[in-house]
Amino acid sequence: MNLLRKIQKFLNWEPSPKPHITLNDELYAQFLPFRTPLILLQLCMIIGTLGYIVIEDYSLIDGLYQTGYTITSVGFGALKEGEFSAVGKLFTITLIIFGSALFTFVILVSVDVINQGHLKRIFKERKMLYRIARLKKHFVICHHNEYAIQVSKQLRENHIPFVVIDPRDDLEEIARRYKYPYYIKAEPHTETAMLKAHLSSAKGVITLSNSIADNIALITSVRLFEKEHHIPAPYYVISGTEDAGAIDKLKKLGADTVVSSTKLAAQRITAMAARPDMENLLEQFLYKSDTPLDMEEIYVPKTSWMVLKKLKETHLRDIANVSVIGITKKDGKFMPMPKGDVLVMSESKLLVIGTQKGILFTKSLVKKQEKPEELKYV
């Protein structure tokens, strides 16, 4: 076993991830009706084999062979059926009748299990769970509605994986219509749903229910899931609400970001009215999925070489072609448009704008503990 693991490690083979819930118990429950026919088949084989050994003086293998093709009504001619005694013939007739009845019983049980539809549903859900188990850094969208449709469309265009959870019976049809690649039919706030969505490897949760009670239950359940399962990095929880007065309440309960559609629409309209040129610029370069520019916050760890360096000493614009347009300090205070003399502090976040390639390169630079080689050439 150790040798096999060493070979797998050398060849960089990783075992396929398994879901936390495999539905094996439900699957076994569907096969329980076959237990009685299988037991009867085994008893029939044992009785038939012993009968031929005693009555016709067969060997163990010959008796087992004779019993096998007799109860399946295959026919005679393989062994010495023509030399059977009267008792042997009556015994063979009994086996044929019992075998026919047994296989008829098996067919009826199979038809009944298939007609119930549970077996097909379990296999489809089990396949979906194994697909979801392969995801990493995905988002879990709770509740299907118009918001979820639009959010999923944007995530799909930006190649960000996501799982939709909703208790509707027609979720499979909804997923097909709106191109949800991964979905779970369950109540989103339950631990079972979170395990099925493989929340342990997710990046965050988006709860967009029209009911504030559902959003509260979801946020509380997610934070409780973090503690019970010892998740090292907290999930990024995004919530939505129509009630602007509920924003602070949802944030206190654990939401990182709360979006109010009414407030957001008002801010966009105000921005367009006050500075239409700037709004058009943002619409063109930041909000489109095919834009060459992107904007993202980059976390500065304690071990980064940038800590206590002046912003101009990092030369990010020269070596990564990005610009730092804001810094969020450890205490949450935001500093817009920092000057070059500003010190980069540990556990702060740099808001950078640039190409996606430049931002990815900046992330790798920030994580380094030693001063990067690229700085020698600027």
Image (cartoon, rainbow, N blue to C red):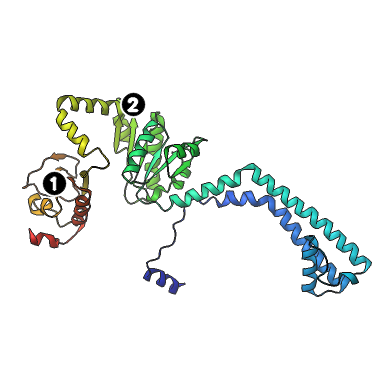
Query: Disc 1 versus disc 2: distance between alpha carbons?
Result: 35 Å
Q: Nearer the viewer, residue 149 or 42?
A: 149
Residue 258 at x, y = what percent? 30, 34
Q: Residues within 10 Å of mark 2 (few under 14, many from 20)?
A: some
Residue 95 at x, y = what percent? 83, 60
Q: Earlier in the sequence, mark 1 or mark 2?
A: 2
Q: Quadrant of residue 327?
A: top left
Q: Point out which mark residue 323 bears.
A: 1
Residue at the far right in the pictured view: 86
Q: Which residue is mark 2?
A: 242
In the figure, 47 relative to 339: above or below? below
Residue type at mark 2 is Glu
In the figure, 283 relative to 107: above or below? above
> Is residue 183 visible in this depiction of the protein?
yes
Tag 1 near tag 2, CB within 8 Å = no
Q: Residue at x 80, y 53 (%)?
A: 101
> Is residue 189 visible in this depiction of the protein?
no
Q: Residues within 10 Å of mark 1 (few under 14, many from 20)?
A: some
Q: Residue at x 73, y 54 (%)?
A: 37
Q: Residue at x 43, y 74 (%)?
A: 3
Q: Quadrant of residue 265?
A: top left
Residue 156 at x, y = what percent? 35, 43
